[in-house]
Image (cartoon, rainbow, N blue to C red):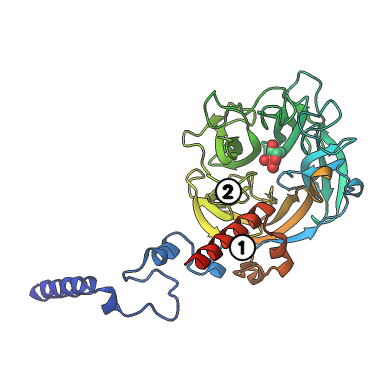
Amino acid sequence: MKINILLIVLSITLFSCNNNKSPQDEGAFPFHVPEKKPNREMSSAMERIYDNYASPRPENNELFSQFKYTKVKGFDYNNNDGTISRRDPSKTIFANGKYYMYYTHRHTPTPPMGAKVCNDTIPSSDWDLAEIWYATSKDGITWEEQGVAVPRPPKPNIGWRSVSTPDILFWKGKYYLYYQGFMQASGTRGDDCPVTASWSESPDGPWTPVNKVIIPNGNEGEWDQYSIHDPYPLVYKGKIYLYYKSDFDEKPHKVRMQGLATANDPLGPFEKNPLNPVITSGHETSLFPFKSGIAALVYKDGPEHNTIQYAEDGINFEIAAISELMPYAAAPFVPDAFVDTKDGRGITWGMAHFININGWDTFHSMLVRFDCDLSQDINDPEMKQHRVIHKPDVYYRQGLSNKQKSRIKRENRKLIDISNFN
Ligand code: AAL
């Protein structure tokens, strides 16, 4: 008994001595980076790489990846004259032995001309006067365009001006397309629209529009009062988790954040999460089940752009990795998007878009394939390289504006004048 008491006292003493060690006593951080968080006092940056990320080394972080791009075949763009645009693809699904993808398709006599000039045939924006088309593929690279899935309905039905930015859900044997339903030309007040839907027994249609608002705009003064964009459904915790984006605040620039609405039925009622917005950055919504939570690709806008984020509960997202050259309007192939998985396997590829291919006066967008390793089932070291090597001309294209050059010239002149004066 006495021995046990003595041993306990001794180990407490040793522990407390060890604990009282100052950083200097502990010696320098070791040469080989411990994979597990070491028991030593560390700076906040060192604490962070152990507390916030799956590994202190990006190559060992399953939610870090580079992104590689492949030109896809099968789509004509009228010599890039701006009259045909394809953009904002849906998640890719696999059915009937092939891949399916749905997207915004615009084919107008002119490129977009702005809200002041637009009319019934001249589009205001790249996604104005659009329809939802679809294409199929055996390899995700060569696509066969199948034509229209959801046309613009006649006035005054929801989406009569334009239907765009679709995403797809498979639920209890039926397919649902959610999409933005414009009732005015985009840009009239803003990019204002609600989300509506169509459903089908087959991924090839025919699609039946529900002709009602599925995700309504928020009330006046609320963050999502004007726009419900980029509907993105997943099946999670036995419900439909539909993520979406809204543009708000608007001055001096729009703020774009992501919200979440959940429902037990694909046609609602959807309940917006009281913690909305749930992601503070990004643009189009791009998410996938990962392990027991939900991961998100967050790019383009906001203080946390160029990150891959993760929410254990699908609601409270944390930064899981930082990346670059991320796909815009990323719509991954998510094999377990609709199976209410408890162990999301992750993603390895999907579709995205490039916008404004060759200038504002012929504005149009193009679909592209991206590949990555955000999967528990592959290990592709090339996707885990820390940096993307850009050629100098990529930097030179990101050049100074004339306004910036004048400011620099003025500052330089000021310095010269001061030095001449002294
Ligand atoms: C896209 C999406 C929505 C917007 C517009 C078309 O990137 O965010 O669909 O309305 O831009």
Q: Is residue 150 visible?
A: yes
Amino acid carrying label 1: it is: Ser
Residue 135 figure quarter: top right
Q: Secondary structure at mark 2?
A: loop
Q: Residue at x 21, y 71 (%)?
A: 20
Helix, strand or loop under label 1 = loop
Residue 290 in percent (x, y) is at 56, 53
Residue visible at 87% across and 42% down in the picture: 146
Closer to the camera in the image, 169 or 332: 332
Q: Is residue 137 above or below residue 25?
A: above
Residue under pointer 2 = 341
Dot 1: few (<14), some (14–19), or many (≥20) neighbours within 10 Å?
A: many
Q: Which mark is residue 65?
A: 1
Q: Is residue 281 left or right of residue 197?
A: left
Front residue (pair 151, 220)? 220
Q: Residues within 10 Å of mark 2 (few under 14, many from 20)?
A: some
State whether residue 169 appears in this view: no
Q: Is residue 380 above or below residue 203?
A: below
Count the marks: how many? 2
Ligand 1 sits in quadrant: top right
Residue 35 at x, y = what percent? 45, 72
Camera-nearest residue between 62 and 158 = 158
Question: Residue 332: x and y, percent?
Answer: 68, 51
Q: Closer to us: mark 1 or mark 2?
A: 1
Which residue sits at x=69%, y=68%?
390
